[in-house]
Amino acid sequence: MSISAIIAAAGSGERFGAGYPKALIQLVDKTLLEHAVSSLAPVVDQIIVTAPAGFEKQISELLGDDIIVVTGGSTRSASVRNGLAVATGDFVLVHDAARALASTELVQRVIAELQSGRCAVVPGIPVVDTIKETNAEGFVVGTPDRASLVSIQTPQGFIASELRAAHASSKDATDDAALIEANGGKVKVIIGEERALKITTPADLVTALSFIGLSKNIRAGIGVDAHTFAEGRQLWLAGLHWPEQVGVEGHSDGDVAAHAICDALFSATQLGDLGSNFGTDRPEYAGASGTQLMQETLSMISKAGYVISNVAVQIIGNRPKIGTRRAEAIEAISAALGGADVSVTATTTDGLGLTGEGKGIAAIATALVSKQ
């Protein structure tokens, strides 16, 4: 018995506020749509994606030639009907791209129930909150017993002929099981899973991260650098030249902010450190600018398969005053790092240590990278 899967991905994502279709929102290393496809692909024979109008080509290029892309309709039910028009399977699974993390194991359990003779199968999880039914004025008119309530998820599975018959009525519903019910069919509920949550808001995206082994994909690093002031040297800091300021000693230009950022990126990616990559035993880096070192660091981590999520650097010293050039420093660092998100802050040490005594300047940086 062949199996087709329809992924409903035509939603605009207005509640998410991303400005583009929700299915194309990135969750670590893949879009929500790609996550959904990867769970279905091992156990189905055909995958059909209903795309927002105007995004068909982009989604087709993203997913490859093995995935069929059709234009979605004005409602979810209309989108599913467009998918059904090209579905060839004896069974049809209908899945929401927004439930991107539903596991392959859940898909297999839905299919197993269909193969045992069920007409329609949906996953669900018990409702843990008390539910109130209200009227148009906002007053409670009933409190259903939550013991008998479940919150329905996807993928939902159907005998293809039964689903087509239910959709023939041209009614709309928030899920396809409701159409089967309205057509007199019996719907079997199986135990769903917490990770099959519907990603609707940015807060849901944060919750989703906890289900995908965040530590396996995202790594953090820290870097620290400090140099003493040296008369006769120009001061380069955060990729900027600071005229009329005394510079610092160093093999390169002594840009402590840039050096700390490089070390943080090397730390996150386990590619050594500033000394092993650009140290004094490398004469070609004598006098090298902080911008050059950041650019070369970006090249190295990119070749290793990493992408920068964000970088933050705090400059520690009595001078120069960073505030007036903060935006300029952020722009310079971001440009050197390929447009990465960058934060620049500054502080003093209240007269303590090398920086507090005015003998030098230091920086500490953190970096967050993702493995692609």
Image (cartoon, rainbow, N blue to C red):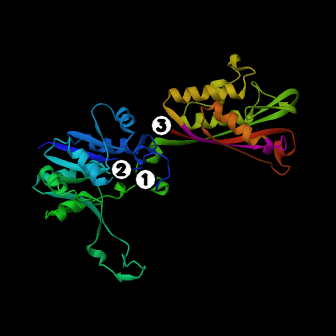
Residue under label 2, please give it.
101
Q: Residue at image x 13%, y 57%? A: 119
Q: Point out the frontmost of discs 3 and 1.
A: 1
Residue under label 1, please give it.
208
Q: Residues within 10 Å of mark 2 (few under 14, many from 20)?
A: many
Where residue 356 appears, as percent x and y from the top left, is 84, 46
**Direction from residue 344 to residue 211 in the image, left or right:** left
Q: CA distance from mark 3 to mark 1?
A: 17 Å
Specify the amino acid type for callout 1.
Ala
Q: CA distance from mark 2 to mark 1?
A: 8 Å
- Judged from the image, the secondary structure of the residue bearing numbered disc 1 is helix
- Judged from the image, the secondary structure of the residue bearing numbered disc 2 is loop
Write down the quadrant of residue 124 in the picture.
bottom left
Quadrant location, the C terminus: top left
Residue 361 in magenta stretch: no
**Direction from residue 172 to residue 275 in the image, left or right:** right
Where residue 190 appears, as percent x and y from the top left, is 22, 61
Residue 316 in magenta stretch: yes
Mark 3–mark 1 CB contact (< 8 Å): no
The answer, for residue 105, to whether it is visible in the render is: no
Specify the amino acid type for callout 2.
Leu
Specify the amino acid type for callout 3.
Lys
Q: Residue 227, relative to residue 136: is it above or below? A: above
Which callout, 2 or 3, points at the residue further toward the start of the chain? 2
Q: Residue 314, relative to residue 228: is it above or below? A: below
Q: CA distance from mark 2 to mark 3?
A: 18 Å
Extent of the magenta region: 308-324
Write down the quadrant of residue 273 in the picture.
top right
Residue under label 3, please give it.
371
